[in-house]
Amino acid sequence: MSENIKVLVTGASGTLGSAVTPRLVKQGYAVRPMTRSARDGWVTADLRTGEGLDEAVRDVDVIVHLASSPGRPRQTDVEGTRLLLAAARKVGVGHVLYVSINGIDRVPYAYYRAKLDTEEVVRASGVPYTILRAAQFHDFAETMLSMLGKAGPVLVDPAWKLQPVAVEDVADRIAELIARPAAGETTEYAGPQVLTFDELARTWLAARGKRRPIWRLSFPGKMSRAMRAGGQTTDATPAGTRTWRGYLAEKY
């Protein structure tokens, strides 16, 4: 029964953690959210130094590992995960679910390389594991469009493809996976639609009532070629059900 299962959630204050934590609580899990900064009812630990990790994993059955630092991935993601799972192995944690990113083995990007290396740390840790490679969230796609439109016109490579997923769908998928025994598998999970950046930009501007031009360019480099080839898309099932247009309609 889930009410007898203790779950540590790293990165609990982040975008995904904020969706996962209440879902697991609602399902009856004894959830222990983890943070670097002191917070009432949360356990305090630091992946960068290892401080507090032994206490954080004590008596824990499952770890949902969401914490990440795109700015310092080697220290936080790779080495921090190594410290976390060394502590978990010592106390016999039965399942770690690590959330990675869809397409990191197909799109050449430094942060993605660090996520791949973190996956290898998980596989070699000796702790039973599941790796969930989730697609980029809807709000990530919107952040990218905002950055590409900083100068006024929205500059896009119209052939770039993305398969954005709702945070809520990923949270639901995590809840499904931790209810099962660790299978030592790596699975992908994405939204229901593959969209080009041209489609993303047009629907985003329309939802916001903006009449800004879209400048369509072919971006150079290996990363762009991988994005045009669908490096961040997948035909894996199951997939999320909430769409990009639905996200925009709800927000705007």
Image: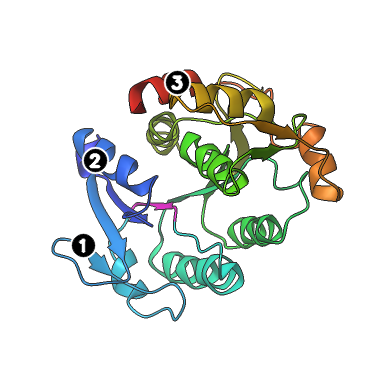
- Return the x and y of residue 4 as percentages of the image width and height: 21, 43
Discs 2, 3 touching: Cβ within 8 Å: no
Classify residue 187 as left or right of residue 20: right
Tell me what residue is drawn at x 53 percent, y 43 percent. Answer: 146
Q: Quick check: 217 left or right of 247?
A: right
Residue 242 tag number: 3
Q: Are marks 1 and 3 in contact (CB under 8 Å)?
A: no
Few, some or many residues within 10 Å of mark 1 (<14, 14–19, 20+): some
* Badge 2 vs badge 1, beta-carbon distance below 8 Å: no
User: Mark 2 and mark 1: span between their CA atoms?
Assistant: 13 Å
Residue 22's disc number: 2
Dot 2 or dot 3, earlier in sequence:
2
What separation in Å lies between label 1 and label 3 (alpha carbons)?
30 Å
The residue beneath circle 1 is 42
Query: Viewer-nearest of labels 1 and 3?
Result: 3
Residue 22 spot, x, y in % from top left:
24, 40
Q: Amino acid at mark 3?
A: Arg
Residue shown at the point (75%, 47%) measured from the top left: 105
